[in-house]
Image (tube, rainbow, N blue to C red):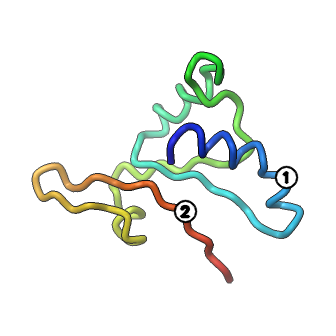
Amino acid sequence: MCPTEICQFSDKAAEFEAIGAQVIGCSIDSHFTHREYTMKPREQGGLGPMSIPMLSDITKSIARDYGCLLDHSEDNGVALRATYIIDT
């Protein structure tokens, strides 16, 4: 996800919860990177405090399983941005 999308989903988290949905962010960045982004204010290019959980997919297994990984054998793939709606 790009920072703008993450912030918008985070800002609307309560509205999603009101209709029984949960928003989860996921990227191939490490949890250390996620932490740094959330500690930096939006005005300075960060995410600021988040209302949604962020998953770290540094192994790229989630990206691969959900079909948004462009598989390049030398660097083990590049994850594209994607939005999934998962129903029980």
Image quarter of residue 21: bottom right
Q: Are marks 2 and 1 in contact (CB under 8 Å)?
A: no
Amino acid type, label 2: Thr
Secondary structure at numbered mark 2 = loop
Instruction: Name the quadrant containing residue 67.
Output: bottom left
Q: Residue at x 80, y 60 (%)?
A: 16
The residue most toward the top is 44
Q: Position of residue 49 (x, y in %)?
A: 71, 31
- The quarter of the image holding the C terminus is bottom right
Q: Residue 42, relative to residue 53: is it above or below?
A: above
Of the image marks 2 and 1, the number of the one nearer the N terminus: 1
Which residue is drawn at the image coordinates 51% and 52% (left, top)? 26
Along the line of sight, which residue is nearer the eye, 35 or 79?
79
Residue at the spot of label 1: 14
Q: How many marks?
A: 2
Question: For the residue carrying disc 2, how many other residues have a C-alpha within 10 Å: few (<14), some (14-19), or many (20+)?
Answer: few
54 w.r.t. 50: above or below:
below
Residue at image coords 24%, 55%: 77
Across and down, in percent, residue 61 comes to 36, 63
Q: Would you name the residue on which mark 2 appears?
A: 83
Which mark lies nearer to you, 2 or 1? 2
Locate residue 77 relative to residue 26 in the image: left or right. left
Element on which disc 1 rests: helix
Residue 66 pos. (x, y %): 42, 71
> Residue 30, how many percent across, how many down?
42, 40
Front position in the image: 13 or 57: 13
Q: How busy is the neighbourhood of tag 1: few (under 14 within 10 Å), some, or many (20 plus)?
A: some
Q: Amino acid at mark 1?
A: Ala
